[in-house]
Amino acid sequence: MGSILRFLKLCVLEPVKSGELYEKKAQIKLDNEKKSFEIPKIEKKDKGSSEEKKRKRRPSKEWRCIDSCCWAIGYICTIWWLLLFMFQCLPGLKVPEPPGTRLKREGLIALHPVVMVPGIVTGGLELWEGRPCSEGLFRRRLWGGSFTEIFRRPMCWLEHLSLDNETGLDPPGIRVRAVPGLVAADYFAPGYFVWAILIENLARIGYEGKNMYMAAYDWRLSFQNTEVRDQTLSRLKSKIELLYVTNGNKKVVVVPHSMGVIYFLHFLKWVEAPPPIGGGGGPGWCAKHIKSIMNIGPAFLGVPKAVGNILSAESKDVAFIRAMAPGLLDSEILGLQTLHHVMRVSRTWDSVISLIPKGGETIWGNLDWSPEEEHVCNSAKKKYQQDFDNNGNNSDSRRLFQVQEPTKYGRIISFGKIVSDLPSSQLQTLASKEFMSNNSSSNSNAACKGLWTEYDEMSRENIRIIAENKAYTMKSLLDLLRVIAPKMMKRAEAHFSHGIAENLDDPKYNHYKYWSNPLETKLPDAPDMEIYCSYGVGIPTERSYVYKQSPSGRCNSIPFQIDSAADGSENGCLKGGVFFVDGDESIPVLSAGFMCAKGWRGKTRFNPSGISTYIREYKHKAPANLLEGRGSESGAHVDILGNVALIEDVLRVAAGASGSELGGDRIYSDIMKMSKKINIQL
Amino acid sequence: MSLLRRRKVPENERTQVPDPNPDGNQKDKKIIDKKIEIQKSQKQQSKWNCVDSCCWFIGCICVVWWVLLFLYNMMPSSFPQYMTEVITGPMPDPPGVKLQKEGLKAKHPVVFVPGIVTGGLELWEGHQCADGLFRKRLWGGTFGEVYKRPLCWVEHMSLDNETGLDPPGIRVRPVSGLVAADYFAPGYFVWAVLIANLARIGYEEKTMYMASYDWRLSFQNTEVRDQALSRIKSNIELMVATNGGNKAVIIPHSMGVLYFLHFMKWVEAPAPMGGGGGPDWCAKHIKTVVNIGGPFLGVPKAVSGLFSAEARDIAVARAIAPGVLDKDLFHIQTLQHIMKMTRTWDSTMSMIPKGGDTIWGGLDWAPEEGYVLSKRRQRNNGTSEDEATESKVKHVNYGRIISFGKDVAKAHSSEIERIDFRDAVKGSNVANHTCRDVWTEYHDMGFGGIKAVAEYKTYTAAEILDLLQFVAPKMMERGSAHFSYGIADNLEDPKYQHYKYWSNPLETTLPNAPDMEIFSMYGVGVPTERAYVYRLAPAAECYIPFQIDTSADDDDEDSCLKDGVFTIDGDETVPVLSAGFMSAKGWRGKTRFNPSGIPTYIREYDHAPPSSLLEGRGTQSGAHVDIMGNFALIEDIMRIAAGAKGEELGGDLVYSDIFKWSEKIELPL
């Protein structure tokens, strides 16, 4: 306060002085100066006067720094506000007309109720009951929103987001529940839309709370457990029935996204299965209530990313950080051990297992073969352009680019870059039994500071054997996971299955663990239903990994990590230890499109009633400039929900259009060719 | 701070770099240089001063603000509570914690039915002026838009004057989920305290449901437009099914009480008008209906609200600052706008007093006569009842809900000269053009009509209906298609199957569900509006021609007349009579309104204002909304939700004279 007063005094008085008393003051100043010039000389003589001067001067010197800070901050703030104001006043950048408005003008009107099923991670979670450390967070979002609690009390936050390691349900004394309603997943974080744009456009043609429903569920749980704990599936069933009845018996259009796709697949089986494990809707339920399912970015056959995640809690992004700043993530600075914590928490989430690639070597390829092997990475763009330019001889052009050795995508995990290229004859692999056998001595558990991951129970020896096994395909990978994370796999294998059914009529397939695997279930008997696979293409997507053993042998480090030093040639698909294929950044085309392209196309054993399927691909186009934000033509996994073409498709279907009216298939990728290569009994 | 810097710089230079050869000439030259320099710098100073000090000031404020914010964020969250406890002594355990220790567990699913005004409304489609408000709250929350674009806001909150539904091009819809009415505005709880306490014993989203509806619409219209009733039905069915067949406990508040009454009739009525749940739907799905502050028989406040868009609060504001509200200042005409808007809301008409003179009293009689607020307090404190003093108490004519002039309110009925207004010719439009775009139906009435209304002098509950019919014909025409205010002579009459009777407890029978229980919980001990003294507004041109006569005051300490309003015991909004009569008499035992003999209980909560500001809205409040934070009420509700019956709670808990008053009402049962 004193400084303020002093300052004001200076400010107000100074001009007066400088005006009226200018002459006088200048004189005085001159005098002063004369005096002060003499100071050095007469310092010793005239100590008294100089001290007086110092006293005068010192206080002003002391608060000068703070003041200039204040000034600078004020200056910045003012300029910031000014700019902000100017920005507001700008005559609105020309925003392209939202598809909703255009289609409304065309005369589209809300017809079929819409149900949205969010994917993993994007749904909000809120706290209903917690430990003392979470005081004041009742009904606040722990997941989604601004995530402020991570920074304030990270350990508390991790503790509350974990599930019980044995049951896969709530730990005692903690209840974290999904946020209900449209707000659950309209924005993931402030400003980061997920469903918001789609909702807004639907609203423009007349949708509102009564004919839209967000089927929020706790995405950490295994699918059947959402019913056991929260009755989420029953809720969804009742909501769909209600929507159907209150909207004049109009069937529902379901729009699941990402993991929501397999969640809804599970629901389709659940609802028709008899109680107690099913919903008891009877065999005609889907035919009666569902018009079409518009799967967006569907993870039908799983994502290789999930493997990297479970194995070493990392994916492309994490590996990249490690390459840029080695040691940052692994070191124990501040006792953070981020990755370990992330790993420990995410391993309690059963739902992650639902995303492990399904269909084994038949789908994902073996040591020497994979359906995508002809994919050419860097030339992807050129190829598409040529597709546009001369549709006729695109096969020739593709030959041209295919000069190099086909990438062995089938080896989802290889230890060392060389291994990933070697022909299989030169590889020595162990039978999976071998590395499962000696699983005895545990590492120094006490030294690990209470941070426990299942790796600590494995001996060095085991880890070495695993690494020596060199290359894993989808089949041996499951065995590997069983060794590495026995508890998690045990929990999860009661809920999920990753194989291919030999005989779908086998009564064992009535168990709910098969319901979310499209290769082990039949679609419901609903010939009028339509299934869309809508996904983005044109972004490099993780497909397989080059791993290495972690350098340090301390108990605290996760023993494997992606070998980010492994880079392929200019045109190769290997970058930073990760092999890429075409996809939407998270899900490879194969996983998203295969079921619609082949598995369910026509009348197959997976689709006995011949539900029609359509593939709608959306070519990725990066936003032209920063102002566009995440772009309106993006094909990325989440950003595609803001893709104008996709929104238009959804709106048209919701307003009553059928697949053929949309124009049937719309394909940019090689999905048809890849599917053809997959040898599966239909 | 460049000012200081600038001033100092020359000095610094000087002191730090002492002149190497301090010769006379050079020194002089230097001094001259300095002089010029100083001149320059001082000139610059005066230029920089203002902007710089502004910047400095802003920076200072920002810094202080950030520091405070930082400290606030660093503060452990239990700090405020700790401080409160230091000052006021230890707080009682919230009921949730207490009952959790007792071992209560979530059992019956709970459904909340919010009342009028407390539910949030959000925009789904609007006119140009509401750009950027998509899915933002127009009602509830911060009400920021009211200040930013008031006319736009009024336009969007209004309904269509003819249909009582959306105006073309505007869709405003209720917020759904618990967030709809947990907090009305930031920090102003409605259901939040109850929800938090229920969560302690294990309730969560799957066992709690907020039956939010658009409270502006008439009850049947919420079904027509939003299928809100179907939604409630489906949700209750789902919750009962997924909670192991445990029936639901319904907790309606305020107007939600009437809404749920309507629902209970609707759900059992055959489709298409009803929900087609069959005659035993309620028996199968509902354990208890816990009505909180229920205006079963309406509230007199609704009359003044409709008649002149004012209630006691506004009347007081007018008394304190006469002219502010009525002035044409800034073209605001606040009251007129509010009136125009609220008159499009059909739901307000659901709360017009029902039952006419039988319930609310005639010109010379009212069930509550002889009531003295202070006396009841004494009696509660333990002194015995004294019949003698009661008879001495001045006679208040509560039956006259509206009187023109204080004298009329007091005079005996034989002394009042009344001229019937019903046939009065309404004058031609009064200066419609000068009133700009604010149109209320009063402009259609003309001077003649207005005068006629005033000359009828006094109105009882039955006559109020005629008055409103006369004053606001359009609104009442809409409203009478949806609501009815009478008493049924013969409940078997098939006409009572129409939905307009469903929300009037005096014209419907309760469902056939003998195992169900009905609670009436409400606060008492707060003066509540019961009757009004009106006067003609001084300038009768563009203004609402009637207003509450705030000068009408009794000198008597004990008087119930204050600022033109007669008050009575109640919860500040709903008089005891309206909240308690049905449970005290109308439904008690097997009556014609309650053919299956559903047991009813009255639970009153005596109002105790919060002892200090720190307590906020108090934990023992009996006020209409604040009662939702009343610990005793919450405890009762939680016990019911965990399975207790009315008997186990202790049956009736009565502080007011409700049983005495009910006795005085002659109603064939």
Image: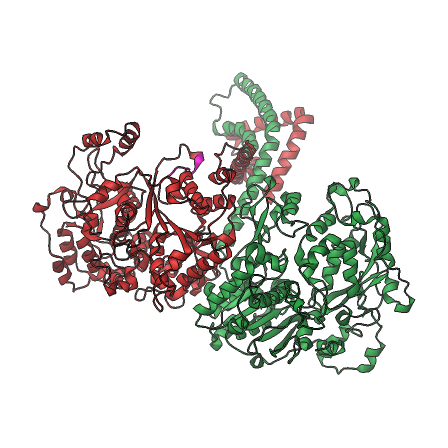
**Palette colour of chain A:** red
Front-lying residue, A30 or B491 = B491
**Palette colour of chain B:** green
Predominant SS of the magenta segment: loop
- Residue A122: tell me if it is visible: no
x then y, percent, for residue B647: 58, 81
* Coloring applied to the structure: by chain
**Residue, far front:** B494
Residue at image coords 22%, 53%: A359
Front-lying residue, A44 or A316 = A316
* Horizontal relation, residue B618 to residue A561: left or right: right
* Horizontal relation, residue A547 to residue B172: left or right: left
x then y, percent, for residue B281: 53, 71
Q: Please tell me in which quadrant of the rendered image residue A435 appears.
A: bottom left
Q: Is residue A632 magenta?
A: yes
Q: Is residue B248 above or below residue A357?
A: below
Front-lying residue, B61 or B144 = B144
Q: Is residue A14 magenta?
A: no
* Horizontal relation, residue B183 to residue B421: left or right: left
User: How many numbered discs, if any?
Assistant: 0
- Residue A167: tell me if it is visible: yes
Residue at image coords 69%, 53%: B342
Q: Is residue B85 above or below residue B176?
A: below
**Residue, far left:** A425
Q: Which residues are magenta?
A: A627-634
Location of the N terminus of chain A (image quadrant): top right
x then y, percent, for residue A259: 34, 52
Q: Please tell me in which quadrant of the rendered image residue A438 appears.
A: bottom left
x then y, percent, for residue B469: 76, 57
